[in-house]
Image (cartoon, coloured by chain):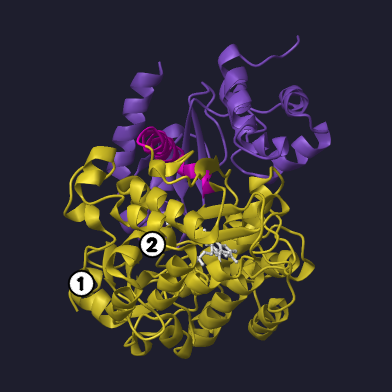
Amino acid sequence: MAQTNLLARWREKKDLAKLDGYKLAGGFRALRKALIMKPADIISEMKKATIRGRGGAGFPAGMKWSFVPPGEGPRYLVINADEGEPGTFKDRALLSEDPFRIIEGAVIAARAVGLTAGYLYVRGEFFEIAQRFEKAIADARKGGYLGKNILGSGFSFDLFVHLGAGAYICGEETALLESLEGKPGRPRLKPPFPAVKGAFARPTVINNVETIAAVPMILEMGGDAFHALGVQGDGGVRLFGLSGHVNRPGLYEFPVGKNLRELIFEDGGGIVGGKALKGVIPGGSSTPILLPGEIDVAMTCDSMRNAGTMLGTGCATVIAEGTCIVQVALRVARFYAHESCGQCTPCREGCAWMAATIERIEKGTAELRELDLLLEMARNIKGRTICPLGEAAAMPIEAFVTKFRDEFEAHIRAGGCPSHVG
Amino acid sequence: MQLAFSADNEARIGRLLAEYPDPKACLLPALYIAQEQFGYLTHEVMELVAERIGLPPGEVLSTATFYSMFKKRPTGKYHIQVCGNVSCFLKGSDRLMAALEKMLGIRDGETTEDGLFTLSTVQCLAACGTAPALQVNDTYHEEMTPEKVVALVNRLREEGR
Ligand SMILES: Cc1cc2nc3c(=O)[nH]c(=O)nc-3n(C[C@H](O)[C@H](O)[C@H](O)COP(=O)(O)O)c2cc1C
Ligand code: FES
């Protein structure tokens, strides 16, 4: 399967991040088209495209757009640029390399759903990127592509950058809304869903950066053509990432359905130092690890689920033999313990307890029976929290302990890491 | 001493108020502006923000303390933040941290006596494909090695004087 450059156009086209360069590359053609289309027809193209959300959950975007009830008054678009799921590094590239595409996609989404204003919620660490994005927004306004009466169409929509401040939980859509409103990022109970009651208690569409960046492409080539690039029910191309012990780490773009083994061993050039593969975390640290025998799988939302894991953000972390898996599990557990917002007891206490237990296993002060307790704790977190952070923490830990039980037991028996690697 | 926003920052906050349907939503951006002007967020600074936006000081405090990027204490001129998450760990982030601790003579979480450097471990910076990564204030440094870290600190020491 050959790489494509439909999203990652910056590999072929120069100066995309400047308004003139973007226009030269055919920018705003899709917007002009959208401005004369009926809003319902734009949504229908999105549905035909069957683009599944690129933020991790894989919800079909066209369907999400159609959930917003008709009506008057302010309605919002929120673009999720929080990119916090460990192992994920794709939105950062889109934001810095092709900002006008995100702006164009936002205006089209707004026109389709009838939204009046939008916010790009950017993680605080991306401060420099956010500043450049604000410049792009200002240029787009000056060019008439954003703001009042866009390109003389009578349609108005404006976009603003809102900077987060170092809380992973704010990537979760309802925590993000709280944060946008100036509050601590504590997830809301659903329902009501954001489509009905979102930002400032108004109907709101929330999409990931990559989902929005794909919108102009979908309108230009048509929903059916976009769908045909991928697989049935999971259309298009997407960005895939490789990090960790792989010879050629970085971003890749492929049609949905790319084979994970091929991505790692052909495109990624295999494992560093010719080592054996130990495991792959396929789509961000909340997705359960796959063993070497499990990676011959198509990277679609559904086939990854059938493989017992999730496609997540499409950014895979590759782990070579010789790495201490307990150390890896510890980093993952600590992350979620640190980032739990604290409002649900099973998540707050459970994540802290899992991290503390794994720390003792790593140090060699735990007992064998604690492994089963660890699994039980993970099971007890799942399904008992307001938002999916609890699951995001429990699922990978369950997989580490179940699939590498020998190694956990060896740590406990040896009174510490037997390999002293990592 | 009565704290006040600079005229520039006053204007920035004024513009912010127009970007949101509810003034309360200006809180995060206003805290950033305050942090930029005053260095970190003391109670007095938070009260100033509360008054300017029209919020109870308690709400400002509860939001400010929720977010790790709002500083409640002074930090060094250069805040070195080393990612310790999985992808960076696999590419040797522990060695970067060790090199920094040795060179700066401080531990993770501390500030050098001359006030030049603060050292922290942070979570994934979304630079995993170019790991290991660190940030100095808002600037990314990627594909780092212990050697590159030494050169970086030496350069910052020069510039920081
Ligand atoms: C704990 C947690 C963290 C999340 N972090 C992000 C994130 O950083 N970026 C993102 O786009 N979605 C993130 N999501 C998913 C969002 O809740 C939401 O599903 C997504 O932004 C919707 O956009 P999409 O349908 O276009 O993918 C997170 C979800 C959870 C539960
Ligand atoms: S793990 Fe370090 S940048 Fe992602």
The part of the image, by quadrant, that contains residue A319 is bottom left
Tell whether position A240 is magenta: no
Q: Which residue is mark 1?
A: A267
Secondary element type, mark 1: helix
Foreground disc of the pair 1, 2: 2
Few, some or many residues within 10 Å of mark 1 (<14, 14–19, 20+):
some
**Left or right relative to B54: residue A272:** left
Main secondary structure of the magenta stretch:
helix
Instruction: From the viewer's perspective, tell me whether residue A95 is left or right of residue A29.
Output: right
Can you see residue A242? Answer: no
Which chain does the residue under circle 1 lie in? A
Q: Residue at x 73, y 61 (%)?
A: A188
Q: Position of residue A131 (x, y in %)?
A: 43, 35
Residue highlighted by disc 2: A215
Residue at figure coordinates x 68%, y 78% from the top left = A382
Left or right of residue A17: residue A80: right
**Kind of residue at badge 1:** Asp
Q: Position of residue A195 (x, y in %)?
A: 64, 64
Q: Is residue A314 above or below residue A74?
A: below
Q: Magenta span covers which residues?
A: A119-143
Q: Which chain is purple?
A: B
Quick one: which chain is yellow?
A: A
